[in-house]
Image (spheres, coloured by chain):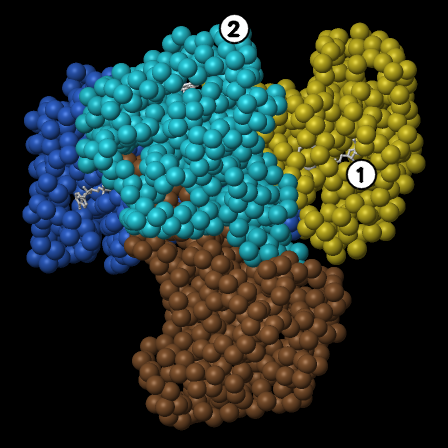
Chain colours: A blue, B yellow, C brown, D cyan
Amino acid sequence: MADKKLGVWMVGGCGNVATTAILGLVGLQKQLAPTTGLVTELREFAALPLVPWGDLVVGGHDIREPNLRATAGRLANEQVVPRELVEACSSELEQIDASIKPGIAYKAGKAIRALADVPVDDDATTAPRELISRLQNDLKTFIEANDLRGLVVMNVASTEPPLEAELPDRWEAFDELLNQPGADIPASTLYAVAALELGLPFVNFTPSAGANFSAVEELTKRKKICHAGHDGKTGETLMKTVLAPLFAERNLEVLSWVGHNIFGNLDGRILDNPENRAAKVATKDRVVGGTLGYDPQTLVSIEYIESLGDWKTAWDHIHFRGFLGTLMTLQFTWQGCDSALAAPLVLDLVRLADVASRAGNVGALTPLAAFFKHPLGTDCHHFAKQHARLLDWVRVTSEQMAC
Amino acid sequence: MADKKLGVWMVGGCGNVATTAILGLVGLQKQLAPTTGLVTELREFAALPLVPWGDLVVGGHDIREPNLRATAGRLANEQVVPRELVEACSSELEQIDASIKPGIAYKAGKAIRALADVPVDDDATTAPRELISRLQNDLKTFIEANDLRGLVVMNVASTEPPLEAELPDRWEAFDELLNQPGADIPASTLYAVAALELGLPFVNFTPSAGANFSAVEELTKRKKICHAGHDGKTGETLMKTVLAPLFAERNLEVLSWVGHNIFGNLDGRILDNPENRAAKVATKDRVVGGTLGYDPQTLVSIEYIESLGDWKTAWDHIHFRGFLGTLMTLQFTWQGCDSALAAPLVLDLVRLADVASRAGNVGALTPLAAFFKHPLGTDCHHFAKQHARLLDWVRVTSEQMAC
Amino acid sequence: MADKKLGVWMVGGCGNVATTAILGLVGLQKQLAPTTGLVTELREFAALPLVPWGDLVVGGHDIREPNLRATAGRLANEQVVPRELVEACSSELEQIDASIKPGIAYKAGKAIRALADVPVDDDATTAPRELISRLQNDLKTFIEANDLRGLVVMNVASTEPPLEAELPDRWEAFDELLNQPGADIPASTLYAVAALELGLPFVNFTPSAGANFSAVEELTKRKKICHAGHDGKTGETLMKTVLAPLFAERNLEVLSWVGHNIFGNLDGRILDNPENRAAKVATKDRVVGGTLGYDPQTLVSIEYIESLGDWKTAWDHIHFRGFLGTLMTLQFTWQGCDSALAAPLVLDLVRLADVASRAGNVGALTPLAAFFKHPLGTDCHHFAKQHARLLDWVRVTSEQMAC
Amino acid sequence: MADKKLGVWMVGGCGNVATTAILGLVGLQKQLAPTTGLVTELREFAALPLVPWGDLVVGGHDIREPNLRATAGRLANEQVVPRELVEACSSELEQIDASIKPGIAYKAGKAIRALADVPVDDDATTAPRELISRLQNDLKTFIEANDLRGLVVMNVASTEPPLEAELPDRWEAFDELLNQPGADIPASTLYAVAALELGLPFVNFTPSAGANFSAVEELTKRKKICHAGHDGKTGETLMKTVLAPLFAERNLEVLSWVGHNIFGNLDGRILDNPENRAAKVATKDRVVGGTLGYDPQTLVSIEYIESLGDWKTAWDHIHFRGFLGTLMTLQFTWQGCDSALAAPLVLDLVRLADVASRAGNVGALTPLAAFFKHPLGTDCHHFAKQHARLLDWVRVTSEQMAC
Ligand SMILES: NC(=O)c1ccc[n+]([C@@H]2O[C@H](COP(=O)([O-])OP(=O)(O)OC[C@H]3O[C@@H](n4cnc5c(N)ncnc54)[C@H](O)[C@@H]3O)[C@@H](O)[C@H]2O)c1
Ligand SMILES: NC(=O)c1ccc[n+]([C@@H]2O[C@H](COP(=O)([O-])OP(=O)(O)OC[C@H]3O[C@@H](n4cnc5c(N)ncnc54)[C@H](O)[C@@H]3O)[C@@H](O)[C@H]2O)c1
Ligand SMILES: NC(=O)c1ccc[n+]([C@@H]2O[C@H](COP(=O)([O-])OP(=O)(O)OC[C@H]3O[C@@H](n4cnc5c(N)ncnc54)[C@H](O)[C@@H]3O)[C@@H](O)[C@H]2O)c1
Ligand SMILES: NC(=O)c1ccc[n+]([C@@H]2O[C@H](COP(=O)([O-])OP(=O)(O)OC[C@H]3O[C@@H](n4cnc5c(N)ncnc54)[C@H](O)[C@@H]3O)[C@@H](O)[C@H]2O)c1
Ligand code: NA
Ligand code: NA
């Protein structure tokens, strides 16, 4: 088994984040890309038995026709990735296209369904269980075809609208519901269940529901498998979790925290849809109050500005009160390339979920909180504490696995 | 002794920081000021036997005629402190004036000497030892007159130019040099020696040399007394120590970090003098490379812009490289009121130096690193780690002193 | 008549803008206030026979109980006006309260009606004509009581929601409609008609409808009276009309222009109501495309952030394309005090409307376009051209009136 | 002659600005580049008999070995110009290299001399007149070889240190001085004299001295030829000349105007040299006071930050006082690509200087003030007025030349 490879399964494999991650991975494999931006390449991770880049094999699901090379070319135009790298890796990208299979858009909302250009299933008459079986077939086929030692399923698909119905708390009832045609369970959750039932770790990089249900958590315990999420923390929210502790630790009172985000990629176009945006704003907005221990007035907007492409600009205005009531202001402007920030974290999470799974970790991986806007299983939003917690886990796990 | 009070001795007692701290202290004593901005009022400090605000008595040295009430009135005009508070505390301020004694400006540079409107001593013919004796007399008189159980000496005087001469490494030689008329040892160091020889803790809130000499460190060991410094961390540098770790922990490569600071108070006027500025820029500039572990191009400017008064505006531009070489930018604008940020830290440091001294801490107080731009005795500039270190000390010291 | 005074009638006389303008006027009369911010005090206006500040007498309408002194005190707390000036002028402010009469809130929308603490009239059963008569009585009484040579009616009341119904184009039909109980004509228009029918100039400093109807324009022609509007241009929009021409004149292509405005005064609270905000955003958004001659993507938001009080902060992000397609960015942050920016323009407009009316100008005063976000009677949004047009009018009118 | 072409002679032909302008020109000739950024392509210029892009032929002087294709390739890497355009125009760029001749670096300062990798002439023993003759030979050879109807000489070479010596006011004395070996007259002026003596228009896009001497102005009158300058206005200063009038026209008092510029191209490296910087800062700093009519505190810095390449970022902080003394702030951040901003203006100036020269304009071309930080022959820094003045000239000249 030591010689076997590990699979990475990208749900939303044709998207910007997936394409940048895949291009980067191929670049790392061909030693054409430096390791900047990869957390698992920090020296503190050296003792952890991380899968080498060369041992990863990529497949995925999407609801659009795959053409990684064309997408990577467009990203090069938008100055997200270097054109030379795209050219050097184009044959590998073309090959990976063949491993990206038609996904599902069940209960994923109108905006997402409108994206689909491969056949997706009818919401009204299908039972979720049928869809799960189809997804599991794809996963098993990929594992066998590539003789893999395992597979990490990574959700980097478009953000679904938040769920309205309440779902059963226990796995038995949840499992039953999966047989009910038209049951109100979104695609992201079906992907999660598909992976976890097969004993494969699932990582949710998006604000979609995914595995965030106590019933699904119960499933992970039964299957003794781990999962992580949700919503990758890459820009403005990352800044919030770095700056809010400063105000708390200096006993400065935050009166209001306003954050405006503008960007113009496909993710932005989907999020421009009010129902999809709701999910995102919720994970972004929770952070400030969570860290401070009280709730200043907050405002978070996400707006689609086409000319910006994948470049997200956030302006934050923080109004705070100091000693003797003096009012002061901190403003920042973050000009980040969304996919270039997300992609290395996606690769890091594949490696870390793999190690966690080999180390026998079960349920929500709270030591990975630093990677997420809304970390599952913990309320801690303090970035430095999250990072310290991660390094503790790295130490403990390194020692455990060395034995 | 439980009933005795503690003295606070402000070197530079007529300045903006001192005046704001004194006004705030009186306000706290009269229960007219909230505790916003005071770190020692965070709940994590509750078990520490901190001196109550009501048990503090203020005196100090300055080279200008004291008129705290007038200074506080000017600060109210500049919207640094509330006018009502100044009015409510004016008789107390007037009384404190009487405890602010003429200081020394020995080897403090031209810009500072030009400020003096009370008689200061001639550089050329005086031996430092004579000046120290005079200072010590003032301290002892104040302690006796007020029947104090102790005194914390706090340097909040103007920033001196950096020292040029090398000073002896061992206390014996240093002590001898103090007898040599015209010896090249700046006022801030004489204040430090005066305090430490009397077994009184010394805190250096400024970038001036103060106790930053191995000979003086040796003195603290002999006298079994503690000291802390240097250069209070209140604005742009505080931000740097919060943000630089983010780049390190996400493996993002900082290419350049530019910081421009503009402000218009007396401190700014003194720092506008290139020789005085050198000291400040040095402590500010050390931080980024210190945290990252490599040296990106940095630029720090401090400019005197009169119209801004005590309001410091800093613009920082951070250029960094992410995954696959993508270049990104973070900018921030900090609009802070310098004295309102510094004053509560000065009060915190008095309390903490007092506890440390009662707990028997000796030498440079490294657990207080979070308060300083250039913390003595440690290379750690990572704010969250500094704060965690402080809380550890608080826990340990609370337990130790509870026994 | 040369000895008679001129009246200023503030509709919304208890608001922030009105209070700041009135305080400033009293300050100018008592020679306690400098002329900074007053356009009519520029030397180019020296030859124009402007009413001296001492010859102005203030009255007004509001739907809230007047207490100018208390409002001015609150504005002093928020650092909008100097406390000393409020104290020095408090008896004058108290006297003016007596001249602020209960107004009307007919068809002014729920948010505004909810403000009222003086009796206002029932929308459903009253005919607009009755309300107009009541308003006219107040105006005539004020003119007589103060033996005025004229009166300028200035609308600085809260922003009404935009009108839904189409109104008749000709005055005759419009006039008839005024007799119909419950007719859908908003308060601001009734104030305008009340003034114009009496031959008094009307200025609309708000985005409310006011005199912006061809029927009302016809009335001004019949009555040979002038009016001006609408929506005072004081901050972000002013910047837009200054900067957009730059891009046009350098042939740089604006791709997107995003503007976020945050502030926390009563105006902001009313505008936080989506229906009222619609009127404001419309006047703010029209400007960029109007100047450039094509329509880049624009976004304008106005958000109520309580902690900011009267201090409006706007962040604008302008994304543009230069030679050979290079994409570049300009960002600005405007931190202005809304009422301090608006008040002098209100006083300027009183003086200019008075001169225009004496000079026999009829209908919409297009030379005053520089003062408004949506200038009536012209499509020109180019600030420098508007200012040049104003100075031309000043020259011509000065000459005309010198004869 | 109607069929003959016009020459463009780039002094500093290998630099970023020249390369971008040349690439753009070739792109325009091959109809591969849009006209964005070109002022002369605005519809207001349609009636002016501008030389068509296809009728321009490029040559130049530089002190470095020409390799336009390599430079353009580097600019594509830095995202200043599109790589596809560089590829499409590479054979034309290679051909133009042959027309870039070794220039002179006489009295151009150490930093510039250190750049030279082609032989330049010794300062100490050469007489300026010899150098001028050599330059004139190059110009005449180019004209003949290409059978040109004329030639515009454009200075886009590195910024020289400001001149220290006073030069004679009259041409006769100046001319004599040119014969004196080692006379203190910088290269830029020798280029100017070389052109003007041959009756060729000279444009100075740099802050170097060039033709800014009354003696040289006299020469232009004698030769009946025109010239323009100096220092192209492309970024922060452009913004200043657009924004300062706003404050003046609204009677807002500017208290301080701070501008920090950071960039990392070769121009920046040269300007990082204090003596060269002096020239630039002087032209940038003059603007604010010039427009306002009084002198607020100003600060202008230009700093070389390597990682930024050709991308200049300027942060400006404007502190101003409004009605009743209220202090407010405007900040802007300009992120522009220096060469992409400068290049189209260089092409515009070639066309306009050509028309002016054909129309018989003599001496400094004040109607072109809008293009320059320090326009010769006028004190007007008000951008909108400068632009209006330009359009007036366009109208008058169009009519004149139509006859
Ligand atoms: N910095 C970041 O980019 C960042 C940070 C945090 C979270 N995220 C989240 O990551 C996700 C991906 O972002 P992106 O920029 O790549 O977006 P994208 O729109 O470029 O890609 C999303 C992809 O998912 C596919 N897809 C949609 N629904 C699907 C489904 N039900 N099954 C399979 N494929 C589906 C789409 O066809 C598309 O190819 C988004 O949810 C985004 O909110 C991104
Ligand atoms: N945020 C902050 O305000 C901040 C942060 C870090 C450090 N500091 C440092 O704190 C110090 C005080 O700042 P400030 O704003 O109050 O300055 P300030 O100029 O208002 O006050 C300094 C005072 O020190 C006095 N003084 C100067 N030399 C003296 C001497 N030799 N002996 C006695 N008194 C002397 C001056 O007369 C003056 O009253 C400065 O060194 C400053 O750099 C301030
Ligand atoms: N910079 C600026 O402040 C600025 C710029 C342009 C336009 N404006 C507009 O000026 C107006 C006033 O702004 P403000 O900040 O003073 O607001 P504000 O809310 O402080 O004052 C508005 C006043 O109008 C009164 N009012 C409301 N409806 C009324 C009615 N029908 N009749 C009589 N009084 C009525 C309210 O009671 C209140 O006293 C707003 O419409 C605002 O949008 C302000
Ligand atoms: N936005 C702008 O880029 C802008 C705006 C205004 C002014 N300028 C000025 O334009 C000039 C060119 O800018 P750049 O970015 O192209 O600089 P650059 O350094 O890229 O190019 C300057 C070129 O001039 C050459 N040179 C130097 N001295 C010379 C001499 N005596 N004779 C002939 N060639 C000489 C150098 O070898 C180099 O090739 C600079 O003076 C700059 O300050 C540029
Ligand atoms: Na200070
Ligand atoms: Na340049």
- Which residue is rendered at x = 37% and y = 56% of the image? C291
Q: In which quarter of the image is ligand 2?
A: top right
- Which residue is rendered at x = 24% and y = 33% of the image? D1
C355 vs C316: above or below? below
D321 vs D201: above or below? below
Q: Residue A241 appears at what percent x and percent y?
A: 45, 40
Helix, strand or loop at disc 1?
loop
Select label 1 or label 2 by which is in front.
Answer: 2
Question: Mark 2: few, some, or many residues within 10 Å (few <14, many ≥20)?
Answer: few
1 and 2 marks on the same chain: no
Q: Quadrant of residue A235?
A: top left
Query: Is residue D49 or residue B286 the one in the foreground?
Result: D49
Chain letter belonging to callout 2 = D
C240 vs B325: above or below? below
- Which residue is rendered at x = 54% and y = 10% of the image? D181
**Mark 1 CB lies closer than 8 A to ligand 2:** yes
Q: With C29 as the anchor, is C230 left or right in this view? A: left
The residue under label 1 is which amino acid type? Cys
Q: Residue C121 appears at what percent x and percent y?
A: 48, 88
- Which residue is rendered at x = 42% and y = 57% of the image? C382
Q: How far apart are marks 1 and 2 (CA)?
A: 63 Å
Q: Name the residue under label 1.
A: B14
Question: Mark 1: few, some, or many residues within 10 Å (few <14, many ≥20)?
Answer: many
The image's mark for residue C257 is none
Helix, strand or loop at disc 2?
loop
Query: Is residue A35 or residue A124 the one in the foreground?
Result: A35
Query: Is residue C322 or residue C329 the one in the foreground?
Result: C322
Q: In which quarter of the image is the C terminus of chain B?
A: top right
Q: Is residue C226 visible?
A: yes
The image's mark for residue D125 is 2
The residue under label 2 is which amino acid type? Thr
Q: With B399 as the anchor, is B68 left or right in this view? A: right
